[in-house]
Amino acid sequence: QLQLQESGPGLVKPSETLSLTCTVSGGSISSSKYYWDWIRQPPGKGPEWIGSIYYSGSTYQNLYFKSRVTISIDTSKNQFSLKVHSMTAADTAVYYCARHIAPLYSYYMDVWGKGTTVTVSS
Amino acid sequence: QSVLTQPPSVSAAPGQKVTISCSGSSSNIGQNFVSWYQQLPGTAPKLLIYEDNKRPSGIPDRFSGSKSGTSATLGITGLQTGDEADYYCGTWESSLSAGGVFGGGTKVTVL
């Protein structure tokens, strides 16, 4: 059974960079059938798509984040990662990684990680 | 403010039916599939409906999805106390700001 697990710091200072990793177990990240997504959910709000990455390394990102976000994939480790630069209090949220069924526009996530809470505070 | 519009809350007694609407536009719901998610307190969203009206394995047929034009609807029949949760719709936005979009969520309360 496929499982996703987020890892990274729970507390980040303003202006610093958040780095999260999602480890995929029980299946291969190198499949043409899936994209791998980062999604966040601010307290009391709905989910917000951050971006998607394909096993080939192709990425698709939410323009809201402009150039603040970097998504990468390491197929040898069965992991994909997220970096968010210049963090502010508005970036405080639960961050999820999820599996997104191809094609890109079908947009449904059938497996989610448990999520990791990230707080931005000095 | 979310791209997709959902009512903040709906409620009904056990055994009754509720419907949750999700309103979008021609560049998202109007041309792409809709999915629905259930989120119990403190947990990750769980896929309930994909490609407008399909249920993943293990999701009871009490949950149904439909779509017409730029709106979609989630129906829950035979309401149970365990259905009390937040529900979100999602789809792909195909405009210049292409990407995944979600609704703001609907809280279902079982009276």
Image (tube, grey):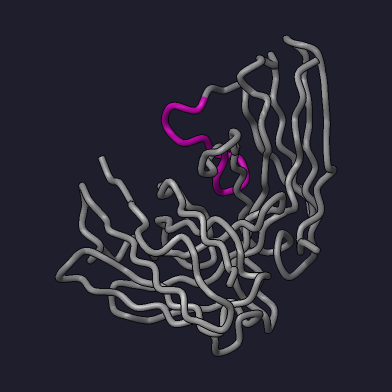
Picture coordinates of residue A13, whole percent (x, y): 53, 75
B87 on left or right of B54:
right
Query: What is the quadrant of the N terminus of chain A in the image?
Result: top left
The correct choice, above or below, for B2 with respect to B64 in the image is below
B55 on left or right of B97:
left
Q: Which residue: 53% across, 59% down?
A: A107
Q: Is residue B99 visible?
A: yes
Number of dots carrying numbers: 0
Picture coordinates of residue A108, whole percent (x, y): 51, 53
Query: What is the quadrant of the C terminus of chain A in the image?
Result: bottom right
Membership of B86 in magenta stretch = no
Picture coordinates of residue A105, whole percent (x, y): 54, 66
> Magenta stretch?
B49-59
Picture coordinates of residue B10, whole percent (x, y): 83, 31
Q: Which residue: 61% across, 19% down?
A: B82
- Between A39 and A30, the one lying in front of the other is A39
Q: Residue furthest front?
A: A122
Q: Residue furthest top?
A: B15
